[in-house]
Amino acid sequence: MILQRYIVRSLVGPFLLGFGIVTFLLTMDMLLDLLDLIIGKGIPVWTVVRLFFLALGWMVALSVPCGVLVAVLMTFGRMSQDNEIVALRASGVHLFRILAPALGTSAIVAIALALFNNYVLPESNYAFSRLRDEMMRKRPTAEIREGVLMDDFRGYHLFISRLNDRTGEMQDVLILDGTSSPTSPRTILAKNGILHFRPEENALTLELFDGQIHQADPNAAEGTYRWLDFGTHILRIQEVGDLWREGVQKRRGQREMSVEEMKAEIRKLQADRDNTMKYITGDLEKLSLPDLETLDLRDPGSAVQGAVGSLWRKALKQARPPAPSNFSVDEQRVVEAIRSRQGEVRSVERRISEFRVEIHKKFSIPVACVVFVLVGAPLGIRARRGGLAVGFLSSAFFVFYWLCLIGGEQLADRRLLPPWVAMWLANVVLGTLGIFLTLSVIRSGDPGRPRPQKAAP
């Protein structure tokens, strides 16, 4: 027990150091944005502080595995440098007994992180999103950027050259209003303006000063348009959406749900997909076709596009000769309905894949704590105390892990990889490498023990 307590205590300090450094690096970019909210946009300090602490949730999920890796590398590197590993091995202590406290501690950390990811992190993300929406309702200009053409409001495009975020005053305003005539939108120019949000009306109000309204007349001769000079013009953007409406229950996103909630959403999506597939099967029966592959051969011009679909269709064409497309007008309408429903099925399956990716991610990231012990302990023993070596190895393995995780998530969202493969591939690769390194250290005898020098003749 003395050895176990000693190793666990030795891990605590380096873990806090690695955790703190990674968390600090992750907060740097966000801190600049938060400071801009306080200084540039006049958001209350308490609101920004709450945003910061709520955003720490996802940072903790990322920082803990890296903290474990840094702790293991530094601890076992120090023990190897001080010849503690050699002394323990010479005393008959097996290397697995030396690694067991780190593995056990990492398993406890992994379980705690998995519970955190499933229960605490979704609520933190949801509270962060709601607080940001509340901030936008109270200070609409906080999310409006100057010098950028915005299309966040249905039927309107808004461009502001200069914006005072504290007062909401705007200068050199350009608005394209296509609500009444999308083919011939009104162009509104104003030298100054003020933006207000009226929650009781669920509307944004733009009070514009000293400007003009230009609009082409589609019924008039070509090149004819109307314009109007105004001193003050009030433009109300009605029904701006639930984002700006106070008291509306915000719908949770994937990263704002627990595993149980995401599984319930998956069951609903699967039921919708199955119902759509029944309609597709009925339409195929109307065409006297057995399956969609036969339809793709019969009418390749309307087949589903995409890299995977193209390879599948090429294989089918090689297996069966294409038949001529001789659908009647009524049958062509059925084909169009099938293709439309196929698009709905693909969209639903993409959402199902995204939910499954999030479910696997909630557990694959905590398991990385154990994987990093398997990789870091033998490397730390071999690398010894060198700070540069520890920093390089930590960064290299951590970057490799997150590149695999991010790349796998993108491939899984596009349904090019199964979600479980995409999220667990990095753990499998690094875990296999860690087991190999651990066995290699065991077979090498006493790591870190200096080799005896041959006596000079």
Image (cartoon, rainbow, N blue to C red):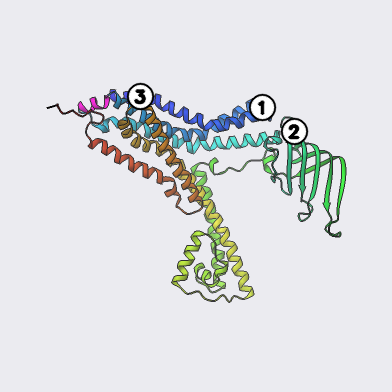
Q: What kind of residue is marked 1?
A: Ile
Image quadrant where residue 250 sits:
top right
The answer to whether residue 201 of the structure is visible from this angle is: no
Q: Which of marks 2 and 3 is nearer the N terminus?
A: 3
User: Magenta residues: mostly which secondary structure?
Assistant: helix
- Asked if residue 137 is positioned above or below residue 294 in the image, the reply reads above
Image quadrant where residue 165 sits:
top right
Residue at image mark 3: 10
Marks 2 and 3, how far apart at CA = 54 Å
Q: Do the residues labelled 1 and 3 touch (CB within 8 Å)?
A: no
| Category of crowding for the residue at label 2, using alpha-carbon neighbours closer than 10 angstroms: few (below 14), some (14–19), many (at least 20) | some
Between 56 and 219, the one lying in front of the other is 219
- Asked if residue 217 is positioned above or below residue 376 in the image, the reply reads below
Q: What kind of residue is marked 3?
A: Ser
User: Along the horizontal axis of the image, is 417 left or right of 251?
Assistant: left
Q: Residue at x 50, y 48 (%)?
A: 410
Q: Residue at x 52, y 76 (%)?
A: 323
The answer to whether residue 78 of the structure is visible from this angle is: yes
Q: Residue at x 53, y 41 (%)?
A: 255
Marks 1 and 3, how far apart at CA = 42 Å
Bounds of the magenta segment: 83-91
Q: Is mark 3 on a helix, strand or loop?
A: helix
Residue at image mark 2: 168
Residue at image mark 1: 39
Residue 415 screen position, x and y as percent: 49, 54
* Nearer to us: label 1 or label 3: 1
Residue 157 screen position, x and y as percent: 73, 46
Q: What kind of residue is marked 2?
A: Gly
Residue 360 screen position, x and y as percent: 45, 45
Taking the view exactly as shown, the residue that stands out farthest to the left is 457
